[in-house]
Amino acid sequence: MNYEELYGDAVELLKSLIATPSISRGEQDTAVLIDRFLTHHGVQNINRLYNNVWAMNRYFDPGKPTILLNSHHDTVKPNSAYTRNPFTPTVEGDRLYGLGSNDAGASVVSLLAAFRHFYDRADMAYNLCVAITAEEENSGNKGLECVLPHLGKLDFAIVGEPTLMQLAIAERGLIVIDCVAHGRAGHAAREEGDNAIYRAMKDIEWFRTYRFPRESDLFGAVKMTVTIINAGSQHNVVPAECRFTVDIRVTDRYTNKEVVEEIRRHVDCEVVPRSTRLKPSSIDPSHPIVKAGLALGRTTYGSPTTSDQALLDIPSLKLGVGDSARSHSADEFVHLSEIREGIELYIRMLEQIL
């Protein structure tokens, strides 16, 4: 199958995806489009769970290792600064405009093109599993997370997110914790009570100044930021409780569990993580897929943004079409030449290991 055919089909599919609203938790119509696209192009044994679609290569061999090709077909809501109809795919020169074109529709269609290229090969050293999943934009539990138990043993993954087709060999994890400093209520005029705000201030200062001992070569230190605080009900009552929220960006040198344990050893307030499921992730720079990308002139870096890669417990490489800086922006677009390049690079990298 030649690149031009794959590229043409990919662009037409992306136009259809743009024209079909797929806001997170409402991706059912684009799931149908992806299912039909694969069926039309001869892919068999297509699977569907909620709004997730996945398939294996024709000659899947359980005795071989498996590579996961994953991206998401849901989008954020279009923001109010749009000057175009976000659901009208429009080509102007080399640009294709539309909601989800860059994040992550271009990666979706390029990964599907690469999967089609290898689908009928019987001589591969690896299996391929392509999974186009839902609810990435809102970290929902009916996306990749619910699909993974159905995919069998996976050995490593390529996650399609806009990286300008450079190699994001690590990604920060994310923890949001809610903290509660407890005091004792009293009258402000009579030196009564134990002010929970003052107790919280000590812990907040710790969050501001503490540096975790292990620092990442790619990211530096774990980053903690207090982003919300709330206490008190009226001016003359010493507050018995002060609540605050901390945003924590975890590096590849710690697990989320280790970070929470370290925090609890140092602060007096109650610490309740909203979730620890968005883990830091990485792949060894000497992994064959990374070496394949480097041989094709790609560069490595650490990604500061969080994606479905955080749900994987296997080595994973974030690599995708488009530019992260365009994600969630008004009048979102992707360059058609980026899609052409993305398809070719995915295929050439995989050819070196398959």
Image (tube, rainbow, N blue to C red):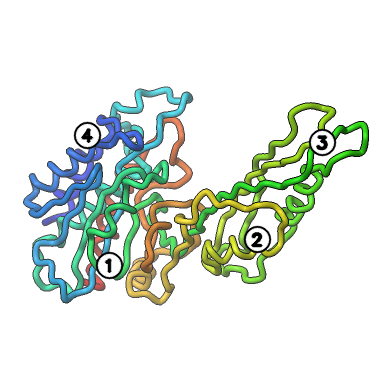
- In the drawing, does residue 262 fall left or right of residue 89? right
Q: Vertical placement of 2 versus 139: above or below?
A: below
CA distance for labels 4 and 3: 54 Å
- In the drawing, does residue 299 fall left or right of residue 221? left
4 vs 3, front mark: 3
Q: Residue at x 38, y 65 (%)?
A: 313
Q: Picture coordinates of residue 285 (x, y %)?
A: 43, 73
Sequence-earlier tag: 2 or 1: 1
Element type at mark 2:
helix
Query: Which amino acid type is marked by label 1?
Result: Leu
Along the line of sight, the residue nearer the viewer: 284 or 248: 248
Asked if labels 1 and 2 touch by Cβ distance under 8 angstroms, the answer is: no
- Numbered tag placed on residue 264 in the rendering: 2
Query: Which amino acid type is marked by label 4?
Result: Asp
Q: Identify the residue under disc 4.
A: 29
Q: Picture coordinates of residue 115 (x, y %)?
A: 19, 57
Asked if labels 2 and 4 touch by Cβ distance under 8 angstroms, the answer is: no
